[in-house]
Image (spheres, helix red, strand yellow):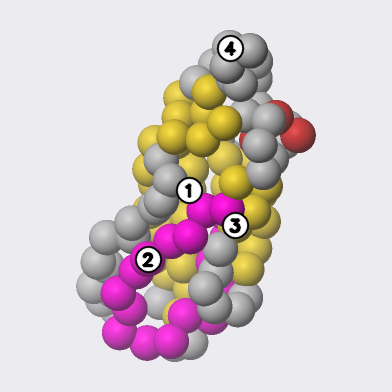
Amino acid sequence: GVQTCALPIYISPRRIDADTQVTIEPTFDAAFPIQSVTYTLDGLYLAESTSAPFALSFTPSAHAAYTPRKEEYILTIEVVDEVYNRIIETTELVIGASAQ
């Protein structure tokens, strides 16, 4: 079988505001050029990016996975490179309500 050597994917920022558009930019070290990056939040599709820097821009409160008063979410990032290696990373994302 094909062996994938997955290096960690770093996400920044990790804590975001629910009502503000945020851009999440992943950093990864891949052996082959990246072809696509797909994002899901708590299992619900967010977006797919097919060009560098593969950033994700979204407003959490406008997304179906967002639940008021819930702060901890799982962000899943699926990276596919040009030789079809698939690397899936999950990270905890904290989405806080705006301080009123």
Q: Which mark is residue 76?
A: 1
Q: CA distance from mark 4 to mark 2?
A: 29 Å
Nearer-N-terminus badge (4/2) = 2
First in sequence, mark 3 or 4: give its number: 3
Residue at screen point 33% across, 78% down: 30
Q: Which residue is mark 4?
A: 69
Amino acid at circle 4: Arg
- Dot placed on the residue nearer the N-terminal end, 2 or 3: 2
From mark 3 to mark 1, how far is it between C-alphas?
12 Å
The secondary structure type at the circle numbered 2 is loop
Residue 27 tag number: 2
Of circles 3 and 1, the one toward us is 3
Looking at the rendering, which quadrant does residue 86 occupy? bottom left
Q: Is residue 66 within the magenta segment? A: no
Q: Is residue 38 magenta?
A: yes
The magenta region covers 23-39
> Could you tell me how far apart the alpha carbons at marks 1 and 4 are, in whole angstroms?
21 Å
Q: Residue 29 at what x, y percent from top left?
A: 30, 74
Amino acid type for the residue under numbered disc 2: Thr
Is the C terminus in the top left, top right, bottom left or bottom right quadrant? top right
Q: CA distance from mark 2 to mark 3?
A: 12 Å
